[in-house]
Amino acid sequence: MPRPVNRLAHPARIRALWLFSILALAALLGCSTQTRHRWLTFFFDGVPPLGAQTNPPPAVAYDEDGRPLILTAPATTATPAAAPPYTRHPPYEDRQCTECHESRFSVRLKGTQLQICFACHDDFLPNLKVKHQPAENGDCTACHDSHGSPLPKMLTKPVPALCADCHDDPLAKGNVKHQPVENGDCAACHAAHGSAQKGLLPKPAAALCWDCHDNFLEKAAFKHQPVEDGDCASCHVPHASPHKGLLTKADPQVCFECHETADLAKVEAHRDQLEQTCSRCHDPHVGAEKFLLKPGVARPAPPATARAK
């Protein structure tokens, strides 16, 4: 029985096929992008249209002839921000777990937080008249991380975000803001654990205010009574207020908290001025003139009965 003839194995056909492949490859390499695309779509199915992106862009870009393009990264002068120093609790850093825990393999504490903390730290609570609630409750970890923190004093959050966990936002009470509050510096006016002063102030109110404001009482001839008594909060709000000067009420309503309108009406200069601002003529703190009159303001005439005498 004769063997079937393999027509593709004929030497002439093989040479022709090789020649056609070489010519097609040369056409693909030497032609334009459009011509190569036509050749590819002629021989293969599923060739994407011109301009379509089928793969993510390579790390190195090439031109249409296959030559790599040199990409220059934009120069930058920004330096990475340095990481804040991490404060570690010494027992934790020294791996002395049993200073606070029952064993190295237990998270159970040896006692209450106050008992453990005051075993190393001084017990400041008995000497404090006004105590911060977490400190009084012995809840030290409400504010401090027991192992360590990138924040000063091993705080769990930066101030004032930490204070906002319990306290309402004091800046929401007005668009006139006290500078330390606006800066988030709560510790500038408040003690974190406790104090002898109301409001956890580290000093009496007037002395605390003089840390930033000039003490205008020292050389004053006449002084407003609340100022002389150091009662700044009788007229001013310490955090924020809707009124200029952080006043508790608008001028003149804040003045009428102490001064009677009936008494003011007896003075001739006041009769048509009761709805005006008092600070237009009077200094609210101190003055060189009687009645705390501002420079250039005329003294009121004495009552008629006084002139007759």
Image (spheres, rainbow, N blue to C red):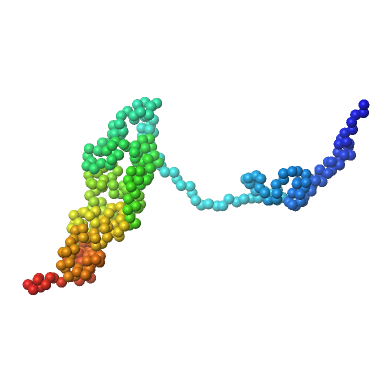
Above or below 277: residue 68: above
- Answer yes or no: is residue 153 visible: yes
Picture coordinates of residue 167 (x, y %)? 32, 45
Give the vertical position of 30 relative to 141 (above or below).
below
Q: Is residue 33 left or right of residue 117?
A: right
- Looking at the image, the residue that sits furthest to the right is 1
- Residue placed at 23% from the left, 46% from the top? 197
Residue 182 placed where, x, y %?
Answer: 35, 53
Q: Residue at x 19, y 58 (%)?
A: 258
Residue placed furthest toward the front: 262
- Quarter of the image with the N terminus in it: top right
Question: For residue 226, what is the image quadrant?
Answer: bottom left
Tell me residue 115's x, y (percent).
Answer: 28, 32
Please identify the quadrant where the C terminus is shown: bottom left
Look at 31% across and 57% down and name the residue there: 242
Q: Nearer the viewer, residue 214 or 258?
A: 258
The relative height of residue 51 versus residue 153 in the rendered view (above or below) is below
